[in-house]
Image: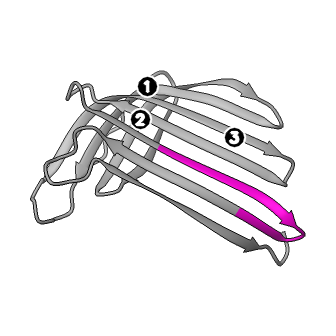
C-alpha cells in the first residue's frame, strides 16, 4: 500500500522494518538544519506519516494495520576528514489515529579508519512500539561490529 502525504514543497518516501513489523512509511516533511558544516550535520525533520503494516502469517493472525502519525526525525553526523564518522538517527512517531500509541526507532553507526586500508565499524539499531498487536513483541534491537579492508581503485 503506497500513500504519500505532502507538507510544503518537499517529500520523501522510505521503507523501514521494525522487527516483526514490516512496514511502509511514507512521509510529508520539512527539514531544519541546526548545524551543517565540514565536521557536523544536525537536522530535524518533522511532518506527517502514514503507516500501512502487513504482518506475515504467524501463530497469531493479525492481518494489516493502517495508522496516521506525526513524525519527528533527528539526524546527527559527526566526522573528521575520512578517518572517523559517527551517525545517529532517531525517529519518534506518535500515532494520531490510535491516540497513546507511540513508535520509536534509532540507528547509530561509528566508523574509524585504523591504519592504511583497515577500518572498524560498530552499529546499533532499536525499534520500540508501546502497543504492539497481541502476540507480537514491542521491541527489537541489536548491534553489529566489523573490520573492513579496502582495496582496488577508489
Q: Secondary structure at mark 1?
A: strand
Q: Is residue 148 left or right of residue 23?
A: right
Q: How is the image coloured?
A: one colour
Query: Mark 2 sits on what residue?
Result: 27
Which residue is outermost to the bottom?
152
Which residue shows up at 62% across the image and 65% down it?
145
Q: Dot 3 corresponds to which residue? A: 77
96 relative position to 122: left or right = left
Magenta extent: 106-120
Residue 150 horizontal/vertical position (percent) = 79, 73
Judged from the image, the secondary structure of the residue bearing numbered disc 3 is strand
Mark 1 burial class by Cα count in 10 Å: few <14, some 14-19, many 20+: many
Q: Which residue appears at 87% of the width and 48% of the height?
A: 81
Task: Report the front residue among 75 and 8.
Answer: 75
Q: Quarter of the image for the C terminus: give it.
A: bottom right
Q: Position of residue 92 (x, y in %)?
A: 42, 32
* Mark carried by residue 47: 1
Depth order, front residue of 145/64: 145
Residue 108 within the magenta-colored segment of the rendering: yes
The residues bearing labels 2 and 1 have C-alpha atoms spaced at a distance of: 7 Å
Task: Find out whether the residues at labels 1 and 3 contact each other: C-beta distance under 8 Å.
Answer: no
Direction from residue 146 to residue 74 in the image, left or right: left
Horizontal and vertical percent for residue 153? Answer: 85, 74
Q: Are marks 3 and 2 in contact (CB under 8 Å)?
A: no
Amino acid at each position: 500500500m503506497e500513500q504519500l502525504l505532502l507538507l510544503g514543497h518537499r517529500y520523501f518516501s522510505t521503507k523501514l522494518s521494525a522487527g516483526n513489523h514490516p512496514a511502509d512509511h511514507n512521509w510529508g516533511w520539512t527539514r531544519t538544519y541546526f548545524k551543517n558544516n565540514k565536521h557536523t550535520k544536525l537536522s530535524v525533520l518533522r511532518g506527517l506519516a502514514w503507516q500501512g503494516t502487513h504482518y506475515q502469517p504467524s501463530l497469531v493472525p493479525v492481518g494489516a494495520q493502517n495508522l496516521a502519525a506525526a513524525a519527528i526525525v533527528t539526524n546527527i553526523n559527526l566526522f573528521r576528514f575520512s578517518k572517523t564518522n559517527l551517525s545517529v538517527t532517531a525517529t519518534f512517531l506518535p500515532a494520531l489515529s490510535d491516540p497513546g500509541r507511540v513508535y520509536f526507532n534509532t540507528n547509530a553507526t561509528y566508523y574509524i579508519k585504523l591504519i592504511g586500508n583497515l577500518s572498524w565499524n560498530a552499529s546499533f539499531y532499536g525499534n520500540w512500539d508501546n502497543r504492539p498487536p497481541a502476540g507480537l513483541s514491542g521491541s527489537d534491537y541489536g548491534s553489529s561490529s566489523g573490520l573492513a579492508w579496502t582495496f582496488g581503485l577508489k
